[in-house]
Image (cartoon, rainbow, N blue to C red):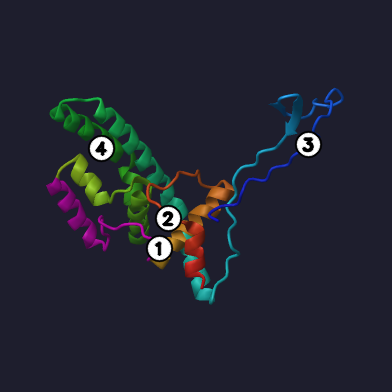
Amino acid sequence: MKKLVYLLLCLPLFAHAQIDSLDTENSDVEYIFFEGDTIPHTAINLNEVLLLHKLKFDSNQDRKRYLILRRKTIKVYPYAKLAAERLESLNERMASIKKKSDQKKYARIIQTYIEDEFAEELKKLTRTEGQILVKLIYRQTGETTFDLIKRLRSGWRAFWFNSTANLFNISLKEVYDPENVKEDYLIEDVLQRNFQSGKLERQDAAIKFDFLELTQKWLK
């Protein structure tokens, strides 16, 4: 099972019974009507909860690497989430603009705004933080950073950005692949734990994978 089933707490059902004495002061009651019968149904619907395994490490070195990865992931995830939100708004607005020239003009305005808003903060990222951010942008949008730049600006600008990033050993073409890359699975583990704790605001991934199945695979 991908996630836990909902827990449903029900009062006993009494067929052909009167309900005059049912106390509903502190309960939300739904009534199910059958021909000749009325059945009270009281239930509490709980939120879905993903059961996470207890963290175990083969060595102190592995534990340190995970903690460093956790710190960096928590730091850059909000930028990836915001990028996805901006992209969704941009796509919706672009769909309402019919002229391609006006679309490009609007895209340039938005991209310039985003760059001005976050450029200084992004410049402070380390190489590994930058690479994690690139991966998470793919997680949240389903597109590589390279392809986003290429689509929203121009192929030459995407090439130039990627070449510059490569000087710092960062690939803008990097994807997020927790099924085949152990580090990406660990990043997902960090995200799921911090979604549950409330430290990070959950945003569904644009790509599909089963975290529990991945956990079974990587923890064998």
Amino acid under disc 1:
Glu
Secondary structure type for disc 3: loop
Disc 4 or disc 2, which is closer to the eye? 2
Amino acid under disc 4:
Gln
Residue that numbered label 3 is attached to? 13
Disc 2 or disc 3, which is closer to the eye? 3
Residue drawn at x 22%, y 25% is 97
User: What mark, if any, has residue 179 been given in the picture?
Assistant: 1
Q: Which residues are magenta?
A: 155-180
User: What mark, if any, has residue 162 been given in the picture?
Assistant: none
Label 3 packing within 10 angstroms: few (<14), some (14-19), many (20+) = few
Residue drawn at x 50%, y 43% is 201
Residue drawn at x 29%, y 33% is 90
Magenta stretch containing residue 154, yes or no? no
Tell me where residue 141 appears, x and y as whole percent: 34, 45
User: In the image, is 173 to the left or to the right of 99?
Assistant: right
Tell me where residue 153 appears, x and y as whole percent: 18, 41
